[in-house]
Image (tube, rainbow, N blue to C red):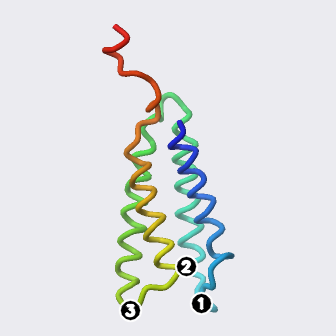
Amino acid sequence: MWARNLEFAVACWLGMSPFLFSYPEGETRLFVHDFACALAIACLSVACYAPRLHRAHLGTLAIALWLTGFAWVASRTGATPITQNHFLSGLVLAMLAIVPSNALAPPRRYLA
């Protein structure tokens, strides 16, 4: 579950990033975008603790692809700290999303 804890930490970072980076005045779409992505990532990472939802972390992969694609398109006019943050957060989430929730447990066939 260490990967789910790190996903939650990335969600917290993404939720705080509008306050840390200088977002353009009146650009509330980016605020809503970051908070919506952060909330979705946090919900999916916490949902993995329920036994029936142990694969909910795969939904984070879709958000990671969205963040990297959004940053890729937005950086065509010039790379800003905001787009770099979205791109790197998406890449980190993509790496964490493919790690299974029970990554520390040995495979079942080793136990038999």
On the image, the x and y values in percent for residue 70 come to: 40, 74
The residue tagged with tag 3: helix, strand or loop? helix
Asked if the residues shown at circle 2 and circle 1 are in contact, with their CB atoms under 8 angstroms apart, the answer is: yes
Amino acid carrying label 2: it is Leu
Q: Is residue 18 above or below residue 109?
A: below
Give whichever of discs 3 and 2 has the lower sequence position: 2
Give the crowd class for mark 3: few <14, some 14-19, many >=20 residues within 10 Å.
few
The residue that mark 1 highlights is 24
Q: Which numbered disc, 3 or 1, marks the residue closer to the eye? A: 3
Q: Splitting the image into 4 quarters, where does residue 10 fall?
A: bottom right
On the image, the x and y values in percent for residue 59 come to: 41, 50
Relative to the observer, which residue lies in front, 18 or 84? 84
Amino acid carrying label 3: it is Thr
Asked if the residues shown at circle 3 and circle 2 are in contact, with their CB atoms under 8 angstroms apart, the answer is: no
Does 65 sit left or right of 24 as displayed? left
The residue that mark 3 highlights is 77
